[in-house]
Amino acid sequence: TRYLGFLLGHEGQGSLLSCLKAKGLATDLSAGSSLDDGGACIFEVGIQMTEVGEKQVDIIGECLFAYIRLIQKSPVSKELWLENQRIEEMNFRFKSVGQPLSTVTNLA
């Protein structure tokens, strides 16, 4: 799910966000997995829409699912996989220290 989130959340040229921005439909996008209140893992895509985008949600949905279909048809990119791996390693190594009680609660 991290690789999928990495691909969907990419902001560079040819990305879903760059497409939506070019059409004036969105300003920000995030994608990734999280745990819901019941402990189930869910995958979310959040899109910050412009006023124009709010009136054209169907087009945003079409772009999103077209991009997902493109990802499904494409082989895994070794370069992107390694880039994602390096980012995840840096996030782990330089993770900020949280409150001990929060850490214990999250691990429980």
Image (cartoon, grey):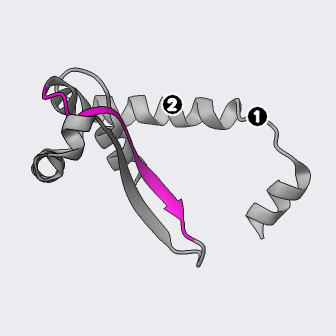
> Residue at coordinates 52% horizontally, 59% vertically from top-left?
34
**Nearer-the-camera pick, 68 or 79:** 68
- The amino acid type found where label 1 is placed reads Ser
Pick the front one: 76 or 41: 41
**Magenta highlight: main SS:** strand
Residue at point 18%, 50% (across, down)? 57
> What x and y, as percent, mark residue 33?
46, 56
Find disc 1 in the rendering and name its residue: 96
Does dot 1 land on a helix, a strand or a loop?
A: loop
Residue interval drawn in magenta? 23-36
Secondary structure at badge 2 equals helix
The answer to whether 64 appears left or right of 28 in the picture is: left
Residue 79 position (above or below residue 105)? above
Near-viewer residue (51 or 60): 51
Residue identified by numbered label 2: 87
Residue reaching furthest to the bottom:
38
Mark 1 and mark 2 lie on one chain; the one further toward the N terminus is 2
Q: Residue at x 82, y 56 (%)?
A: 102
